[in-house]
Image (cartoon, rainbow, N blue to C red):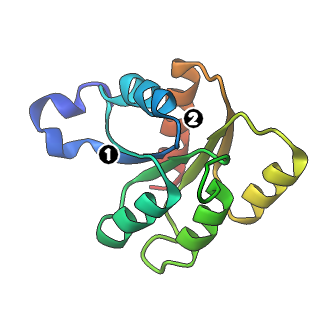
Amino acid sequence: MKERGKCNMSEKMKILAVDDNSISLATLEHELKKDYEVIPMNSGDRALQYLRREKPNLILMDIQMAQKSGIETLREIRGMEKCKDIPVIMLTSKQDKASVVESSKLGVDDYVVKPFKGDDLQRRIERVLREHK
């Protein structure tokens, strides 16, 4: 996976990163840009607009966002025919049981707590993408 993007940039898998915190988005882009094409979105509504046009290989999404929570956004994504099978990793500082249970009901593939370690997130992304091939 490490050498893949060097010959042809279009071969990189696309990850839609959804978080209303610009520092979190910048951190995700920095950690992942070598191996993935990261599409940053700062709201659930913008992510939904993007998903009406494109289909990424994976979605990383924060739960706590100002306008529309990650759970509300994911509920809408799961209702979109072409997007309901996209793997999702919730990336959040929110650890309450209700959020974990609700995320699980909506079929999230993993739940990563902020602050995260870059290598741990990379491993989790690789595992989820492998499982969804």
In the figure, residue 78 lies in which quadrant? Answer: bottom right
In the figure, residue 32 lies in which quadrant? Answer: top left
Query: Relative to the observer, which residue lies in front, 122 or 52?
Result: 52
Q: Percent x, y for residue 23?
A: 48, 27
> Tag on residue 13?
1
Query: Relative to the observer, which residue lies in front, 23 or 51?
Result: 23
> Which kind of residue does numbered mark 1 sit on?
Met
The crowd level at tag 1 (other Cα within 10 Å; few <14, some 14-19, many 20+) is some
Residue at position x 36%, y 72% in the image: 52
For the residues labelled 1 and 2, the Cα–Cα distance comes to 15 Å
Mark 2 secondary-structure assignment: helix
Query: For mark 2, what is the residue?
Result: 124
Q: Percent x, y for residue 9?
A: 15, 38
Up-down: is 80 above or below 68? below
Mark 1 secondary-structure assignment: strand
Q: Quadrant of the N terminus?
A: top left
96 horizontally vs 68: left or right: right
